[in-house]
Image: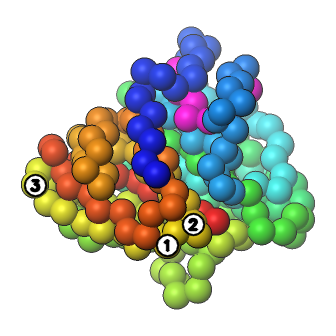
Amino acid sequence: MIEIRPFKSLGHADHGWLKARHHFSFAGYQDPARMGWGRLRVWNDDQIDPQTGFAPHPHRDMEIITYVRQGAITHTDSLGNEGRTEAGDVQVMSAGSGIRHSEYNREDEETRLFQIWIEPTARGGDPHWGAKPFPKGERAGDWAILASGMDGDGDALMLRTDARVAGITLRAGERAEWTLGEARKAYLVPAVGAVEVNGVAANERDGVAVEAVDTIALTAIRDSEIVLVDTP
């Protein structure tokens, strides 16, 4: 099954400094048909005004992945971590037994990002944070595993769940495949461009929910950048 969730159908919120689209139920947006996808619970498409951001607040028992699409985000947390993640790069905060953090756009331009939350395999554990650059050239035509809790993905940022977050860039007409397996689910979004997913068209920032499919076949309709979550 492949279900396209058009960008215009997503939940939305306008807080002035923050404009958000919600692929799944979140905060004031609640849709019983969109409560999550496997262990994936949140996929927010956020636009953050310059010199604004999320003030310190707590989390626990969630793997929180931030994929920066434009600009940069500056992270600080109660463990003493601080870091600036730029466009194309990724950070992971494993909230574990509890952590407080802030995320600010300290830039003079708008920041755009995907914030993705995945349930951990087990509750508790020591919280941690990490970030890593992922040059787009290394993703040209080939999948890059950005974050993972699966064996064999040693260069990826660590997740405490048996899921993967992957990215790829494709030029118009190029093809790629992702082996999923019929027992797992995937959710993918073209951050840029448009693609066909097993022959079904998806436009920029649409969501694509996939299940009961062994192999996902992508064909780029336009030059595209795709982010995918593979989850039980």
* Rendered-image quadrant of the C terminus: bottom right
In the picture, the disc for residue 181 is 1
The image shows residue 203 at horizontal and vertical percentages of 29, 35
Crowding at mark 2 (Cα within 10 Å: few <14, some 14-19, many 20+): some
Residue 95 image position (x, y, % from top left): 78, 57
Amino acid on which the number 2 mark rests in the picture: Arg
Most foreground residue, 26 or 60:
26
Disc 1 on helix, strand or loop? loop
Instruction: Give SS at disc 2.
Output: loop
Circle nearer the N terminus (1, 3): 3
> Disc number at residue 31?
none
- Judged left or right of residue 39, residue 49 is left
Nearest to viewer (mark 3 / mark 2): 2
Q: Can you give x and y, in whole percent of width and height, for residue 190 in the image?
A: 34, 44
Q: Is residue 215 above or below residue 65?
A: below
Q: Give the residue drawn at x 27%, y 41%.
A: 201
- Which residues, given as a range, are shown in magenta? 19-27
Q: Find the residue positioned furthest to the bottom.
A: 152
Label 3: few (<14), some or many (≥20) within 10 Å?
Answer: few
Residue 69 vs residue 180, the one in the foreground: 180
Amino acid carrying mark 1 in the image: Gly
Mark 1 and mark 2: span between their CA atoms?
A: 6 Å
Dots 1, 3 in contact, CB < 8 A: no
Q: Is residue 25 magenta?
A: yes
Q: Neighbour class for label 1 at 10 Å: few (<14), some, many (≥20)?
A: some
Residue at figure coordinates x 20%, y 55% from the top left: 219
Label 2: which residue?
A: 184
Q: Which residue is mark 3?
A: 173
* Residue kind at label 3, given as amino acid type: Gly
